[in-house]
Amino acid sequence: MEMKFDFAYGSGSIPLNVRAKDIEVIESVTPEPLADLQEAFRAAVEEDAIASPPLKELISAGDQVTVVISDITRAYMHQERVCPLLLDYLHDVIGVAYENIVYLVAVGTHRAQTAEELARVASPYVAERVQVLNHDCDGELVRVGVTSRGTVVEVNPLVVGRKVIIMGGTVHLFFAGYGGGRKSILPGVAGRSTIMQNHAHALDPQLARSNRLCGLGVTALNPVHEDMTEAANMVAPVFGINLVADGQGRHLALPSGQWQKAWEHSCTLVDRFNGVTIAEKADAVVVCAGGYPKDINLYQSCKSLINGFQAVKPGGRIVFISQCSEGGGPAEFFGWSRYLPDNTLDASLRKAFTVAGYIFYECVEIADNAEVHVLSDLNPDDLTAMRMHPHSDPAEIQRLLDFGDKRVIVMPRGANTVPMVQAE
């Protein structure tokens, strides 16, 4: 059989045909988007608030308020549509003066946002009225405690001694279980050392591999998640607003309220909307990151690669489509390749853990367990060093998409599709 696809690639698309004996296309099945976002927001922060009084009962007109939001790498959650609604609510309904409100971008260890990007992530409307600032993980920090696992929690001063509202998109995440919620604090507005201490739990404490307690949709006994949660509780946000969106960035739900309970509810919705049950793993998987900004760099788009890896048999083929116009992402990303020839990547990462290093590590683990072909704008030498097969010409990929008598799973929007094997 043969099926035609138009795979998103950066801001454009690439038409490709897949041929195989059996082709299964999997995508998340989501409800209709919210018809009236403004009314949905009002209800979410008032009568529908989860395990919490309405927002207007938690904040007073004289309060100093910090709203923590995501950076440009999460632009696909379209928080800029909700940020103005929250600002108007704080100012017009509660009476908080503009000068007492700050929108703080949870950059974590990512690069700082440009002035244009700050206006984009918060919306020009918000940027014209209040300060929108980058967090700096190497800048001024305040120590707020130490977790039970020994992580020294240092955070941005703007989330200490103020009323803190966190806003983020909930998605499946490969080592923390899910994005959003407590991640707005750690790693979002935490110090570099705090972030590295936390993320180091993603490595197996005894074996040279990733920690099997950490995985997509896994929170129970997940040391990374539990450590993040402890840190967030030290900041104690007064309210959380969670964005649940479909593959086109349309909002499906805004679970809001007590920051942890509302986020946990959003996780159940993400499981329902993005989790796709498959009967068994396939001989091959074709997975597309979903276009810009999901495929802005390999650091970000590897989430789709990891999702695709859940659906392929050991040693099977993965064809990964991701433009990566900004390369690997962080400057250090491909630098970790230097530890591969002498097999010291695991030891080196444990000695000097970084987030980019761990994501590189995850990509290499996948390449060691599957035949990975990547269509991208990346330097081919960088991918070859990672034991992947680089391609820049769609015609090359087209030739690879004739799978003969194999069974193939196609994931056109890999970032929003999490395969779950029925037997598991």
Image (tube, helix red, strand yellow):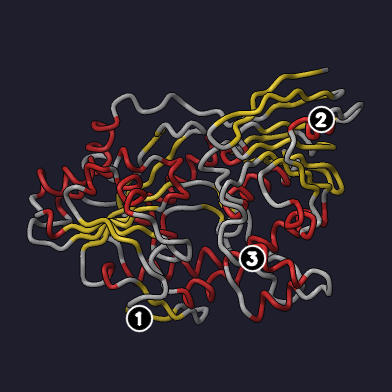
Above or below, 278 against 144 in this view is: above
Q: Which of marks 2 and 3 is in front?
A: 2
Relative vertical location of residue 381 with respect to residue 308 in this rendering, above or below: below
Look at mark 1 in the image and give the residue it sits on. 143
Foreground label between 1 and 2: 2
The x, y position of residue 406, in whole percent, is: 88, 30
Q: In this view, does 375 lie to the left or right of 301?
A: right
Mark 1–mark 2 CB contact (< 8 Å): no
User: In the figure, residue 205 lies in which quadrant?
Assistant: bottom right
Q: Which residue is drawn at 83% across and 42% down?
A: 317
**Of 326 and 305, the residue lying toward us:** 326
Report the amino acid beneath label 3. Tyr
Viewed as shown, does residue 258 lie left or right of 294?
Answer: left
262 and 350: which is toward the camera: 350
At numbered mark 1, what does the secondary structure look like: helix, strand or loop? strand
Residue 303: x and y, percent? 61, 49
Which circle marks residue 241 in the picture?
Answer: none
Q: Which residue is drawn at 59% across and 55% down?
A: 299
Label 2 sits on residue: 401
Q: Dot 3 corresponds to which residue?
A: 358
Q: Is mark 2 on a helix, strand or loop?
A: loop
Q: How far apart are the alpha carbons under marks 2 and 3?
A: 30 Å
The relative height of residue 344 versus residue 238 in the rendered view (above or below) is below
Residue nearer the viewer, 172 or 17: 17
